[in-house]
Amino acid sequence: MIGKFKIGVLSTLTVVIFYEFYYGSLFDREPRLSVLRLKDKYFVYSCKRGMTCGGWGDRQKGIIALYLMANATNSKFRIQIEKPCDFTSAIQPKSFNWILNKNEFINKSSERRHILDRHGRALRDKLTKVNITEHFPRDVSYLTINSEFSHYIRQNKLYSQSLAWLKHLSMAEIFATIWRDIMTLSPELQKRYQQFVATRVAGKKLACAQIRIGPDPNNSDFNGEYRVITVAQTAQVWNLFQKYNDPDKYKIFLTTDNQEVRLKAKTLFPGVFIESDGPIGHVDKGPETEKTCHAFKKVILDQHILSTCDVLVTSWSGIGRHAAYVRGKESDLYCLLKDKDLRPCNFNSSLFQPSNW
Ligand SMILES: *[C@@H]1O[C@H](CO)[C@@H](O)[C@H](O)[C@H]1NC(C)=O
Ligand SMILES: *[C@@H]1O[C@H](CO)[C@@H](O)[C@H](O)[C@H]1NC(C)=O
Ligand SMILES: *[C@@H]1O[C@H](CO)[C@@H](O)[C@H](O)[C@H]1NC(C)=O
Ligand SMILES: *[C@@H]1O[C@H](CO)[C@@H](O)[C@H](O)[C@H]1NC(C)=O
Ligand SMILES: *[C@@H]1O[C@H](CO)[C@@H](O)[C@H](O)[C@H]1NC(C)=O
Ligand SMILES: [Mg+2]
């Protein structure tokens, strides 16, 4: 009897510790819920199979936009990403649980709106003024958004109290604060990341490049993508990286949408080139297959690695930009843009992000 009781207590304790490890404290799992008494209203970032949502960088912008709408209105925030596969296989909740639980929504009114590109830009203009609850009156709003909202919603005087914390933060700080607070790698990606650090980074400094080309004649996922930079322009990155071509000190990490670029770096820097495992794919345009799911996990892992780099080259892409935000520092940051020379840049630079944001 006593033995059984002890095992029961021990295993309960193990569960509690395990749970706390992954989700933060068990007793304030939804701290904002208990402290602020959140309304029984939900903003859900939604990307279901078969929908157009945009790639990973686009989706991150949508997640932040929905988080801020929920935050402004004291509502609950959830994420539903099912395309190309379940998002929680790559990223899990940290400070509170944002996993969608359909049982919470029984008997609640809901609506779904697809607000991409110019529709998103029109909405963020509106959200500088309107009452968000009146604009989205249903109990549950499933929204697909791919625009940057933070600098618009923060202007809304109706929410000057709830969004006061944004007041002195830059766009980079807002993104990084939210991301670090609510996201953690899944156990699977955590393990892959640790193995990568132990066996491939192996104590060296990291010089990294995120090179987005756009189309790739050898990968139909990228058919019809607009050309971000030319393959020829990447020579400037390889020139910069010559000074890190020292296996005693550096590893050169590359993440790219393009096979030719990848193979070029691999041949130019045989002693220092490293990459993560997995296929290159487009998470929104690729087929909803196991392979695209692997590509999805790879892009999330690669972005996490980019956020830890000593030197970082970004091309025109949300993936590189958001990695740079989370990395935080603006030193040893370089930008490569179409028809421009590779240059040092910072978060204020129009080389880094559009000046009209
Ligand atoms: C809004 O976000 C800030 C910063 O993370 C947090 O301190 C605050 O509790 C949040 N409010 C709500 C209602 O979620
Ligand atoms: C939903 O509404 C039905 C009909 O009013 C009611 O019988 C049921 O108990 C409700 N369920 C929940 C979970 O509130
Ligand atoms: C927004 O509108 C709702 C419904 O009319 C109202 O209850 C709420 O107080 C308004 N919020 C603000 C911040 O004015
Ligand atoms: C890509 O395809 C072209 C032909 O379309 C071929 O010449 C080239 O070698 C391929 N490159 C790679 C990296 O597979
Ligand atoms: C970026 O701009 C902000 C506000 O205009 C300023 O406070 C900050 O110092 C600038 N940062 C850099 C690195 O130029
Ligand atoms: Mg895109």
Image (tube, rainbow, N blue to C red):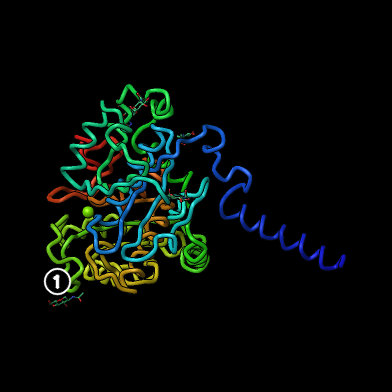
Q: Is residue 18 visible?
A: yes
Q: Residue furthest right?
A: 2
Residue drawn 33% across the image and 33% down it: 133
Instruction: Describe the element under mark 1 as helix, strand or loop.
Output: loop
Q: Is residue 190 left or right of residue 284?
A: right
User: Quadrant of the rendered structure where residue 168 is?
Assistant: top left
Count the marks: how many? 1
Q: Point out residue 263 in the picture as x, y percentages from the top left corner.
A: 26, 72
In this rendered view, identify the residue nearer to me: 76 or 328: 76
Image quadrant of ligand 6?
bottom left
Q: Point out residue 194 in the picture as x, y percentages from the top left corner.
A: 52, 63
Question: The C terminus lies in which quarter of the figure?
Answer: top left
Question: The N terminus lies in which quarter of the figure?
Answer: bottom right
Q: Is residue 224 left or right of residue 85?
A: left
User: Quadrant of the rendered structure where residue 220 is?
Assistant: bottom left
User: Please, is residue 98 above or below residue 269 in the view?
Assistant: above
On whether ligand 4 comes within 8 Å of the CB at mark 1, the answer is yes
Crowding near the residue tagged with mark 1, few <14, some 14–19, many ≥20 C-alpha atoms within 10 Å: few
Q: Point out residue 59 in the picture as x, y percentages from the top left corner.
A: 30, 51
In this rendered view, identify the residue nearer to me: 123 or 185: 123
Q: Which residue is mark 1?
A: 217
User: Quadrant of the rendered structure where residue 226 is?
Assistant: bottom left
Q: Is residue 331 visible?
A: no
Residue drawn 47% across the image and 46% down it: 182
Residue drawn 25% across the image and 55% down it: 53
User: Please, is residue 296 above or below residue 352 in the view?
Assistant: below
In this rendered view, identify the residue nearer to me: 146 or 273: 146
User: Please, is residue 177 above or below residue 107 in the view?
Assistant: above
Amino acid bearing label 1: Pro
